[in-house]
């Protein structure tokens, strides 16, 4: 059950990867940054000693996050696939249009990120929040 929470929380890392991709020049992918974010989040969560109640709350937050952001995540995934295809054929005009569409989504992505982080932090004790905040 907690692993599903972790998987959903990794959606946050996906959103971080999207934010970096929005500003990338043509031909530059953010996969290494995205992977790093996923690894960093996984490590942060692995280092926390959570109670069963905290794990349950994280699962609830995770499920709600997925429900609330499913359409946004699907839209971004579709646009990123289209962006990769446009770049592959050298269609800079289409790639620029798609990056502009992703850029428009940035505020929604940032809002979803901030909301999720606030919810996670509200579940953690002050000591856990300090550990979670460490780089």
Image (tube, rainbow, N blue to C red):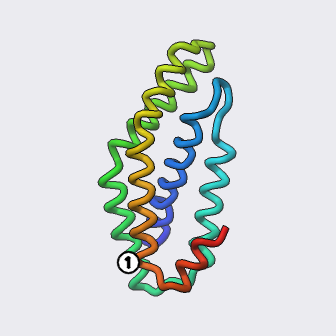
Query: As displayed, is residue 74 above or below residue 9?
Result: above
Residue at left offset 57%, top offset 12%: 91
Image quarter of the N terminus: bottom left
Q: Is residue 64 left or right of residue 83?
A: left
- 126 left or right of 62? right
* Residue name at image x 54 percent, y 82 percent: 128
Q: Quadrant of the C terminus?
A: bottom right
Q: From the viewer's perspective, is residue 50 above or below residue 87? A: below
The residue located at (64%, 42%) in the rendering is 31
Whole-percent x and y of residue 85?
A: 55, 21
Question: In the rendered image of this protein, does residue 56 appear above or below residue 38?
Answer: below
Residue at numbered disc 1? 56
| Residue nearest the observer in this picture, 123 or 70 | 123
Q: 24 or 32, which is in the foreground?
A: 24
**Which residue does the image show at 39% across and 64% down from the upper left?**
62
- Quarter-wise, where is residue 52 in the image? bottom left
Q: Number of callouts in the render? A: 1
Q: Secondary structure at mark 1?
A: helix
**Horizontal and vertical percent position of residue 51:** 46, 87
Instruction: Where is residue 115? Give x, y as percent.
Output: 39, 61
Mark 1 Cα within 10 Å, few/some/many (few <14, many 20+)? some
């Amino acid at each position: 059950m907690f692993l599903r929470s972790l998987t959903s929380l990794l959606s946050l890392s996906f959103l971080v990867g999207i934010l970096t991709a929005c500003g990338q020049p043509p031909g530059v992918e953010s996969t290494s940054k995205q992977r790093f974010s996923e690894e960093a989040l996984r490590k942060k969560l692995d280092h926390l000693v959570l109670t069963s109640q905290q794990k349950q709350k994280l699962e609830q937050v995770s499920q709600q996050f997925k429900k609330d952001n499913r359409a946004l995540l699907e839209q971004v995934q579709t646009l990123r696939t289209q962006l990769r295809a446009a770049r592959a054929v050298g269609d800079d005009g289409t790639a620029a249009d798609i990056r502009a569409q992703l850029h428009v989504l940035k505020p929604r992505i940032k809002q979803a990120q901030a909301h999720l982080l606030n919810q996670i932090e509200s579940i953690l004790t002050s000591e856990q929040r300090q550990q979670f905040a460490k780089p």
